Image: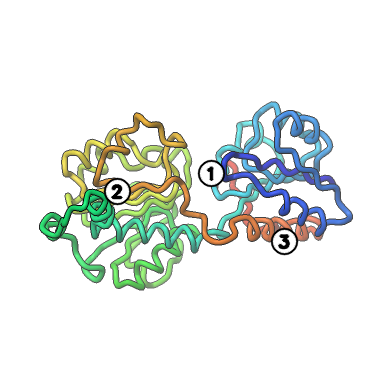
Amino acid sequence: MKIVVGIHDLPVWSIPDHEVDRLAASLPDDVVVNAPESDARLREYPAADVLFTTRISADQFAAARSVRWMHSSAVGVGPLLPPEVVAGDVIVTNSKGVHSEAIAEHALALLLAVRRGLHLSRDRQSASTWAQEELQARHVPVAEATEVVVIGLGSIGLRIATMCAGLGMRVVGVRRHSARPVPQFIRQVYPTADLRTALRTADAVILAAPQTDDTRALIGRDELAVMKPTAVIVNIARGRLIDDEALVAAVEEGRVLGAGLDAFRREPLPAESPYWRLPEVLMSPHTASFAGDYWAPVVDLFLENIRRFKAGEPLLNVVDKRLGY
């Protein structure tokens, strides 16, 4: 079996050579080829049985005539789903669950930091300013008096919900299939159609949903209009889930307290983005999933799926290509 590795998104999303070597050593009966450049992929894909990658173009997929299965090293699989892939028979799996713990911790860190004004404290520290009077004027409820709405209850969203509940927060969920079972500590689950109802009483909103046609600009002007002026928004999912212009206006006008953002429509974030100049926005450069060794567990999951693929067993994390997750 020929396995082609095409994971090369600079500067940090490129698989290290030693992990490709580990794949090859773990699969001595297979051919493992690293194809970091587009030309190499077009050359290697025609004879490939399996692709381990994060994205594929229409011409690359057309070249991959023998591919039966593609595994993404990421959770989001939008770049692996051009129309030709969605309409075809190729199986797509992802790395869901591998970094849920790290991403959930990052979401909670952003939430607490923005609510407590720690980013403002750091700004004032840089200016040698004792900002006690300014920061004491921020009125946010303690955890046990906080209602947090988690949008998306996949592996990441459920882990976030667990951590928030552990702090004593009242957890409300929003997801496409609201009737599916959830842990008892999630007090209520709304369908996506009732998102605004859920947002009206939220003290904090955490986005953990996949990027699909249905979730594009999920938080926009109308959603922000129903939220409390003391509410905080955290996005550790995908940048396109938020209408940036609407969020910037809401923060500037004091219609929400602030935001913690780890994902953006364009990355790196352009210098002209108004987010850079908003003190009530705390940003991290799409680093929520990084904690310890990022790549080793991703490769471990892929190796387990290789074993299952050869044995004819069900693969882990099979993506519904039409839903996009």
| N-term-proximal mark, 1 vs 3 | 3
| N-term-proximal mark, 2 vs 1 | 2
Res 194 seen here: no
Q: What is the C-alpha distance between the residues marked 2 and 1?
A: 28 Å
At x 27% / y 54%, what residue is drawn?
Answer: 122
x, y percent for residue 60: 71, 30
In the rendered image, the residue lying farthest to the right is: 29
The label shown at residue 304 is 3
Q: What residue type is labelled 2?
A: Ala
Q: Name the residue under label 1.
A: 323
Q: Are marks 1 and 3 in contact (CB under 8 Å)?
A: no
Q: What is the C-alpha distance between the residues marked 2 and 3?
A: 38 Å
Q: Is residue 270 left or right of residue 27?
A: left
Res 135 seen here: yes
Question: Of helix, strand and loop, which one carries label 1?
Answer: loop
Q: What is the C-alpha distance between the residues marked 1 and 3?
A: 25 Å
x, y percent for residue 173: 36, 59
Q: Mark 2 points at which residue?
A: 259
In which quarter of the view is residue 219 placed? top left
At x 70% / y 40%, what residue is drawn?
Answer: 6
Of tags 2 and 1, the one toward the viewer is: 2
In which quarter of the view is residue 251 placed? top left
Q: Is residue 165 left or right of residue 55?
A: left
x, y percent for residue 30: 86, 51
Question: Of helix, strand and loop, which one carries label 2?
Answer: strand
The label shown at residue 122 is none
Q: Which amino acid does label 3 sit on?
A: Glu
Question: Of helix, strand and loop, which one carries label 3?
Answer: helix
Q: What residue type is labelled 1?
A: Leu
